[in-house]
Image (spheres, coloured by chain):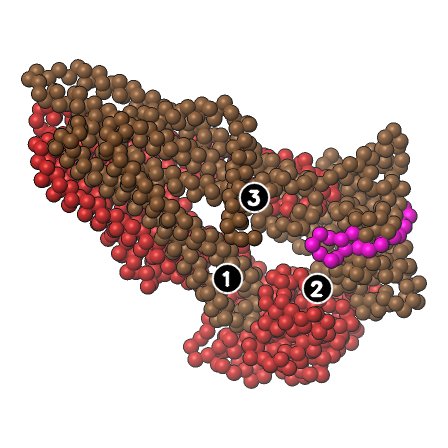
Chain colours: A brown, B red
Amino acid sequence: MTNATTQTSKTTQRRQTFKRLIALIFSQYKGWLVIAFIAIIISALAGVAGSLFIQRLIDDYVLPLMRSNHPNYGPLLEAILIMGALFYTGVLATVAYSQIMAVLGQRIQKSIRDQMFTKMESLPLRYFDENDYGNVMSRYTNDVDTLTQLITQSFPQFIVATFNVVFALVAMVSLSPILTLISLLIFATSIVIVRWLTARSSKYFRAQQASIGSLNAFIEEMLNGQKVIKVFSHEATVKQEFDQYNDDLRNDARLANGFSTMLFPIMGNLGNLLYVLIAIAGGALAITHASLLTLGTIAAFLQLSRSFSQPIAQISQQLNAIIQAMAGAGRIFQLLDEAPEADSGTVTLTQKGETWCWQDGDKQLPVRGQISFKDVSFEYPNSDAGLHDISFDVEAGEKIALVGETGAGKTTITNMLNRFYDIDSGQITYDGINITRINKEALRRSVAIVLQETHLFSGTIADNIRYGRMTATDDEVIAAAKLANADKFIETLPDKYETQITGNGSELSSGQQQMLSIARAALVDPPVMILDEATSNIDSRTEQLVQAGMDNLMTGRTTFAIAHRLSTVFNADLILVIGDGRIVESGTHEALLAKHGKYYELYTGALGG
Amino acid sequence: MLHTLMQSIREYKRMTIISPILVVAEAAIETFIPFLMAAIIDQGIRPGNLNLVVRVGLLLLVMALFSLVMGAGASWVSSQAAAGYAKNLRQDLFYHIQTFSFQNLDQFSTSSLVTRLTTDITNIQTAYQMLIRIAFRAPSMLIFSIVMAFTVNAEMAWLFVIVVPILAVGLVTIVSKSRPLFRQVFKRYDQLNRVVRENLRGIRVVKTYGQQDSETAKFKAASGNIFKVFSKAQRIVALNMPLMQLVINTTMLLLSWFGAKLIVGKQLEVGQFVSLFSYSTSILFSLNMLSMIFSQLSVSQASAERVVEVLNSESAIADKPDARTDVANGAIDFERVSFRYPGTKKDQLHDVDLHIKSGQTIGIIGETGTSKSTLVELIPRLYDATAGTVRVAGQDVRDYDLKTLRDNVSVVLQTTTLFSGTIRDNLKWGDADATDEEIQHAAQLAQADGFIQTLPQGYDTPLEQTGQNVSGGQKQRLTIARALLKHPKILILDNATSATDTNTEAKIWQAFRHEMPDVTKLIITQRLGGIVDADKILIMAGGKIAAAGTHSELLAENEWYRQLYDTQTKRGGGQHD
């Protein structure tokens, strides 16, 4: 694609985003926006009227008064009072529109954020795997912020400035077409200069954005490895590399800011230039009587030229802000347009006392935990990794150990079971029901996972355990904690179950965090469990506690364990050896050992890495 | 604080001074223009003196051009100075972080340092440019305009003396009422960010337990909290514009009334009257500009404080003058060594005595939190002992040059950090001049050569920043190879083989024994398999060496050791991770 076509497609894209944004705002707040719009026009009119007033003041009141011997100030006072009324109406109009836009901006901000989050919660896991978290976070903050700025400031200022220019132009033409011509000449010059400056500065602003990005990535990587840098006395090399990134950024920043900040003094002084030209031309015309220019007209023109040149700089600045905000709005819409996780499942879960049942139309079947994979294949998008022709049957209550090297596809198999990803072909059944017929929420409630990496949420310890079942009583929470062996350490904490966890539970050791996530699963008491055994460095005693907790959790339910522990493998009813997304071998420990195949190799070496 | 920050100006001093000079000159010319304009009207147009109109007019044109050039020049120069200053400050900050000891690094989180180096410095750059440009322009315009107004007509100028304080009070009220609200908004943003972050990271948990609705409710509460305060703050700030309009309009009306009377009374000329309109606008706008500068600078002040905080925290560990630059051998001695983190009350290590001969292999075991890592990190001075002495080759570690010491004491840290670049680049961290043979040899010893050879690009395989193309165990072996390339006299492995399978681990130990008999080796591990034939095994407990001895000695004498050994062997030859 050539540069020109990319440019046009970008512009059309921007235009579409803009249209959509306007539609979004209008659809919700039409009435308020109309009021704000009217207020903006009134405010702009009052401004121009002020400039025109000078002409009348001088020509109709001051000069006649100077000539009269007995000056009568009555008409002047009257004119000033009328003008005052107009002025203060203008002020009230400004109050109205700026207050409306401030509140609307905030309302829209909140509503867009809420929509984004609601959408995000409905997205399939793929979205979370494919998108950089920092990037997603910045849509909630930076992008929404610029959008709000656009609504509360840029839009109104842009409209006010445009009206100011138009009204001022009309007023100027009515006062003196010749002086207007001079003004337009300066106007044209300023447009050319503005366009040149903004083109330059936005080019370097883009470059600056890219430089900040690479500097950021460099700093992040180096600071994360700062201790290694120390250990290897590598400071000098790192400093040298840093200087390169830093110099690049400086160069782009100085050019970007240089061109953009020059805009205002240049525009301001072009205004001064216009001011002077009007005085000379106006004076010359008046003195030579080439035109019927009064003193008042010249004075009014001088004032008008101010309210003409300043808005032009404003318009160009706001245009830039609008273009920048469109990029952010585009990213927001992109998130809002993501397709939510599809769910056509109609089979739901009901609970009858202690037992769980499938509710399939009018039929009720008890949940047992029998799982079958039949010729299941799957490929991750943009990757060769996946599964090929996976078939196996698991009876209710059986223990399955998945073993194999890193990246072999063990986790992928479990991801298919709770439909974090959907299979490409084949079939998975749960108690004989095709899992695509089961409502996703019900399916996931019946398949709990204890992940290798524990995720805790801010809140108390009790809140975190209760995450599995919000309605659980305190006694149930404590019972679950006991089952997970977590009760003991919780009791030693200052606030026990009410201890606050901030961030990602950094105040707990990783073993303790794992025990909490086991307790969380225990509270749900699901018929099927997926356990991803941790490889993290926890000391032997804590590990024994964690494993005892896991063992407690496994009893009496179908369990898929991504195994790193030998005891898990020994006790499994079925071992699936996974390699390159296929089942390489399957059977019990003894049978597989006797085979002297892949399992034997792994067993004598390692069970994964 | 200012003193610290000013040290980064350096080569941009000249530009930093030129910018305000240009700005003040521009302001002076600009305020003089309306004055001459009055002359054109009063002495040129009204009496019909075309000659004067043209002469003064041309002078004004030249002045306007001058002012344009100076204004644009000031913008350009101030941008150069600010971008340059930001570069220097960022460099100073980054260089300073490079001098940090582990203790300093523990104090600041990585993400907070990144923010300081990027966002905070960008804020300071904006503030710097503002300081050397607009912060000079606004007060000069204000003062010059007031002076000119008094020159034109003192009686009328008193009007400004009354109006200005009224506007000032209004502006100050707006700033002071909105600022605490904005501060609250920032805090509430943290809350919102936290919900988003937790949901991004923990989405699997959210979906497993079907908690989308309750998370959405949490989010809506957080965004609602922002809305409440933010809309209040924005409404206050939105009063700024109408306030300005109100004051300017009122001033115009008063000027019109009193001006007209003075003109009729022959105390004021029409042109002067028009110039007073100009002065009134520039006085009031400058005042508004000042209030904007203050609120902007207060935002940057927080950033400046955060940067200075880092710049002012001195590294606790520094080279002595005439430090030793050679390490004779790998002997290690701890003499009554204690260590505690600053600001804490509990010793992490307490009164440790330990003597290791050059070339010995030492295993270190113990539960989490027993300061195993702290013990070994004192040897290359990653931390300094609070009391007692740590010696290497008989010399106090504090007497060595830091680089010399760390080149001779190689530590493989628990966290496996590799950098973007090829495998070869990463291994060369150990020795920048290493030949291909040396690199391969080190990789062979660390049992990494095998898997590197299976990669399509071998040693030139680029590592992703997250290191996703190699497994945890492979990463660990790369970090070991990197450490070996330093040819250290002391090698410390802190849980460096936890994700490596027992088979490979055994091969690594074997290679070490055969190829590096003279290197002192300290091995922290959870698995006993690798250290059963060590010269000595230390059991750490509560910041002390609870027991020490060979495997057979400990097996006979130490109950805890025996139990640990039993549990690990019963499961079939070692614990698997």
Q: Which is nearer the N-term, disc 2 or disc 1?
A: 1
Residue A75, compared with residue B353, is above or below; it is: above
Mark 1, other Cα within 10 Å: few <14 / some 14–19 / many ≥20: some
Residue interval drawn in magenta: A378-399
User: Mark 2, chain letter?
Assistant: B
Residue A72, compared with residue B164, is above or below; it is: above
- Which residue is disc 2 drawn over? B471
Under mark 3, the amino acid is: Arg
Based on the displayed image, in which of its 4 quarters is residue A465 positioned?
A: top right
CA–CA distance in space, label 2 to label 1 = 31 Å
How far across and down, in percent of the image, does residue B394 sit? 55, 82
- Which residue is disc 3 drawn over? A331
- Which residue is disc 1 drawn over? B104
Q: Are marks 2 and 3 on the same chain?
A: no
Residue B557 part of the magenta-drawn span: no
Depth check: give the residue in front, B113 or A404: A404
In the image, what residue occupies the spot 9% across and 40% down? B51
Q: Secondary structure at mark 1?
A: helix
Whether tag 2 and tag 3 are in contact, CB under 8 A, the answer is no
In the image, what residue occupies the spot 30% across and 60% down? B13
Q: Is residue A124 visible?
A: yes
> Left or right: B401 with respect to B441?
left
Depth check: give the residue in front, A549 or A180: A180
> Left or right: A250 with respect to A512?
left
Position of the C terminus of chain A by quadrant: bottom right
How far across and down, in percent of the image, does residue A270 sit? 27, 43
